[in-house]
Amino acid sequence: MRFASSALLAVVSAGVALGAQHPFTAYDEGLFTPLGDLGLLSTSEFTTLAHPAFPNHNVRVKQSQFCDGGVNAYTGYIDVEARHLFFYFFESRRDPETDDVMFWTNGGPGASSTMGLFMELGPCRVTSSNSTKMNPYSWNEHANVFFVDQPVGVGYSYAEYGESVGTTKDAAADIAAFMVIFFEHFAKFKGRALHLAGESYGGRYIPVFASAIYDKNKELVEAGLTPVNLSSIMIGNGCTDFGTMFPSYYDAQCQDPTFPMIHDISTCVRMKEMVPRCQKRFKESCEDKMDAIDCAAASSFCSDAFNGPFGDKNHYDRARPCKGAASITECYPIVQHTVEFLSSEATQDLLGVDPAVRGNFTHSSRTVSQAFRDNLDHWAFPAQHYISALLERGVRTLIYVGATDYICNWIGNERMTLALEWSGQEEFRSKPLSVWGWDVGEVSGLTRSGGGLTYATIAGAGHMAPYDKPRESLVMANRWLAAESL
Ligand SMILES: *[C@@H]1O[C@H](CO)[C@@H](O)[C@H](O)[C@H]1NC(C)=O
Ligand SMILES: *[C@@H]1O[C@H](CO)[C@@H](O)[C@H](O)[C@H]1NC(C)=O
Ligand SMILES: *[C@@H]1O[C@H](CO)[C@@H](O)[C@H](O)[C@H]1NC(C)=O
């Protein structure tokens, strides 16, 4: 969720990423008994699950009945060697036996997915440091939903021996292993359609995670394992491609017909002059040459040119003024409540949090964020190409955007969708924008759909769209899961 744009990057050093490999071994299916009845899991102690195909990986899981009240809920760790990824898993309110599975991550990089869980689309919202209330618009209405704190170093997820993950590609290796191991153990979900969803920097994570899962399937089939049934990706207010997002900051401030003009003409003209310069420098340094130092300088140039004038207005929502991106807890007090809730010993006992990460909870890890910056992960790979490749392989893609967001705004996202290159591009581009509504006669936003790709705005919502417009967001998600048009 937290995607700081001011000081987009201050420090640059070409860090060396850890190459993460998760080999697995062929095994005799007859020798392995997956977990059948989840209802047999303890509520107080973790049950450790091992799998012969994944000798270096374990799942520790317990029942943690909280938050929803009506459905089975589980928490635990997937241990990928010395890395421990914390997850929450809520079964579907409708039918856990047949509904699809969804994975959710927030962005940052470094933001905890508990923001999505307890503020946006999870089964409950935190109301104070020791209470929650049920969310009637939770996305587990029609799906079995995961919330995963990733990469390691975020939330309750951690790595032993000070290992860290500082690139999306390394994070993807852990998530691909996570999903395979989950489906192998939780047999009742095996083969079930999977949707990967995320927000903000998740617009960069999700296409890469989905691709890693897709590519891994070939190995799984060769080893006699069941492939992961990757069905779609869903990106909310994503900052997927800065090549299109940077120039959109000019439009969002000076030329968005849906938003009041905030600047003098002279300021807007100065920014307009920067658009071609930024585009040229970004393309040369980040896309063509991919030179670390030049790319950082180009990105810094673009950021100063466009985000400087925006100042400390609320980067997440042009319609809801507050004290700027730096103080998200002041703009959204629920974030502070969530931090207090997750810092409490009672909550940590309930969830089974490991001793290594007990104590005060951090909603956004500066260490992880800095590691991604140091590795130039923000700029140096074109996440949109992964979307094209997924579309080409039949993985449906939803790009939705709360329309009053500034930092990953609709203008940049719409441009990104129109520029995606795959065999469905012409069909998509030929479609006009049309109105969609959560109910007959309602106007919830605009949408365009074709070739497996859907772009949609959510009117009146900011960066955390399901927080601002929960009903509209849920209707959209449910129609998407059912493969209906918006
Ligand atoms: C919850 O917190 C409030 C104030 O923060 C306190 O008055 C109340 O006793 C607490 N309730 C429980 C069950 O701990
Ligand atoms: C994958 O999910 C889709 C959509 O739910 C379903 O139609 C299909 O049968 C599933 N594929 C497998 C191999 O289970
Ligand atoms: C944890 O947070 C509380 C409340 O904000 C603070 O008083 C305490 O010093 C913090 N503990 C640590 C170890 O940082």
Image: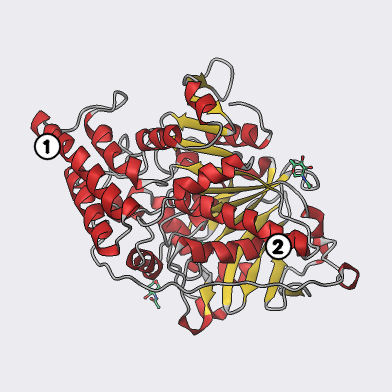
Residue 296 in the figure: left or right of residue 329:
left
Q: Is residue 99 left or right of residue 107?
A: right
**Circle 2 sits on which residue?**
219
Identified by mark 2, the residue type is Glu
* Mark 1, residue position: 270
Residue drawn at x 41%, y 33% as measured from the top left: 414
Asked if 359 appears above or below 267 in the picture, the reply is below
Report which quarter residue 243 is drawn in: top left
Mark 2 to mark 1: distance in Å? Answer: 53 Å
Q: Is the residue indicated by label 2 positioned so its CB lies within 8 Å of ligand 2?
A: no
Tell me, yes or no, whether the two marked residues, 2 and 1, touch with CB atoms within 8 Å. Answer: no
* Residue 150 is at least partly visible in this image: no
- Rendered image quadrant of residue 335: bottom left
Residue 111 percent coordinates (x, y): 44, 59
69 sits left or right of 32 in the view: left
From the viewer's side, name the closer residue of 379 and 439.
Answer: 379
Helix, strand or loop at label 2? It is helix
First-in-chain label (2 vs 1):
2
Other-residue count near label 1 (Cα within 10 Å), few / some / many at <14 / 14–19 / ≥20: few
**In the current view of this chain or complex, which residue is farthest to the right?**
30
Q: Is residue 399 visible to the viewer in this orientation of the structure?
A: yes
**What x and y, as percent, mark residue 320?**
32, 38
Task: Please identify the quadrant where the C terminus is shown.
Answer: top right
Question: How far across and down, in percent of the image, does residue 46 sit?
Answer: 71, 74
Residue at disc 1, secondary structure: helix
Vertical position of residue 367 compared to residue 460: above or below: below
Q: Return the residue found at the far left.
A: 266
Picture quadrant of ligand 2: top right
Dot 2 alpha-carbon crowd within 10 angstroms: few under 14, some 14 to 19, many 20 or more: some
Give the number of marks: 2
Q: Is residue 352 above or below residue 443?
A: below
Q: Nearer the viewer, residue 394 or 319?
A: 394
